[in-house]
Amino acid sequence: MSEVQFRLNDSGKGAFYIEQGGEQVAHMEIGISGSNLTAYHTEVSEKLQGQGVAGKLLEAMVQYVRTNKLKVIALCPYVNAQFKRHSEKYADIWNQHWR
């Protein structure tokens, strides 16, 4: 399994992603504004589903957020479901009151 990579453009939009053979096979779209990282969408190619790839993206995002002292706005259904399922694990970084 390839390592999770990260890119961020000047306007604060970016992604955590995995490439295999020069092809992007998984990504989590994010945006950073102020002290919040918004997780918008997570997608894993069909051939990699069920192998914990989305979890690797989530892990990388959480590590980045903690390192940079950010909070997460979980608009992505996958991220939101994981944060709800393991709320004690993510309580320190989950911005549930952003509205």
Image (cartoon, rainbow, N blue to C red):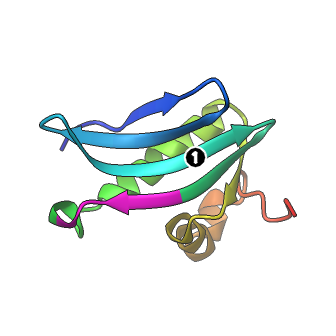
> Farthest residue in the front direction?
11
Which image quarter is the N terminus in?
Answer: top left
Position of 11 relative to 61 (above/below): above
Image coordinates of residue 91 in percent, x first then y, are 71, 60
Which image quarter is the C terminus in?
Answer: bottom right
Give 72 or 45, whichever is nearer the viewer.
Answer: 45
Position of 43 relative to 35 (above/below): below
Image coordinates of residue 92 in percent, x first then y, are 73, 52
Disc 1 residue type (three-letter): Ile
Q: Which residues are magenta?
A: 41-46
User: For this view, does 63 lie left or right of residue 26?
Assistant: right
User: For this view, does 77 lie left or right of residue 36?
Assistant: left
SS at circle 1: strand
Q: Residue at x 45, y 59 (%)?
A: 42
Q: Residue at x 46, y 51 (%)?
A: 28
Give the overall secondary structure of the magenta segment.
strand
Give 99 or 85, whichever is nearer the viewer.
Answer: 99
Tell whether position 45 is magenta: yes
Residue identified by numbered label 1 = 30
Image coordinates of residue 98 in percent, x first then y, are 85, 59
